[in-house]
Amino acid sequence: MTKRREPLSIDEAMARIAGKVPGGWIALAKHVGKHERTVRKWGDADTDDEITLSAAIALDTLYQKSGGAGRPLLTAHEDLVDAARAVAFADQFEVVRRLSEFVKESSDAKQALLRIALPDSCISDRHLAQRELMEVREVIDGMLLCLTAEPSTHSRDPP
């Protein structure tokens, strides 16, 4: 049975390189001085075997020498780091998302308030300003809830 290769994985990157390099997996193994089985295991999430940095550099370079565009192993590593970072800093990303919402809503409210300061404003302008301010209040309430949640373990506060 063929294993499913996860996107953003070392396994997928290795398979891409093996598919481009003439000689496939055997050529990859020979290029880094390892057995084919060892090289295949580097991408297998069910084993503890991991590719070394020097082998990853060598295989990305071999891929390019064989006409491949990009650096599959470096890209896979970057994607894995980005995914781990998104999990580790999820609360901070949520603050940024909410901040973006706050900036938009407060800008709309400021515009509406400026409109009612003009001599030709009317009651509908006042109602719009009230609605816009209520939307800002909702965003602020959400931000306050977000900030009262337990922060990630990466907090910079001293122990």
Image (cartoon, helix red, strand yellow):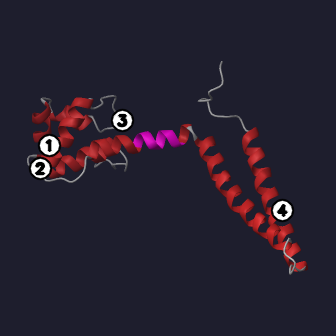
Q: Amino acid at mark 4?
A: Met
Chain-order first, disc 3 or disc 1: 3
Cα separation, mark 3 vs mark 1, equals 26 Å
Residue 35 shown left or right of residue 73 in the figure:
left
The nearer-to-camera label among 2 and 3 is 2
Chain-order first, disc 4 or disc 2: 2
Q: Amino acid at mark 3?
A: Asp
Label 1: how many Cα within 10 Å (few below 14, some 14–19, many 20+): many
The nearer-to-camera label among 4 and 2 is 4
Residue 105 place in picture, x, y as percent: 73, 62
Which residue position is annotated with label 2? 66
Q: Quarter holding the C terminus?
A: top right
Which residue lies at the image location 65% right of the left edge and 46% below the top edge? 95
Would you say the residues marked 1 and 2 are in contact, meaning their CB atoms lie under 8 Å apart? yes
Residue 56 place in picture, x, y as percent: 24, 36
Q: Amino acid at mark 1?
A: Leu
Which residue position is annotated with label 4? 134
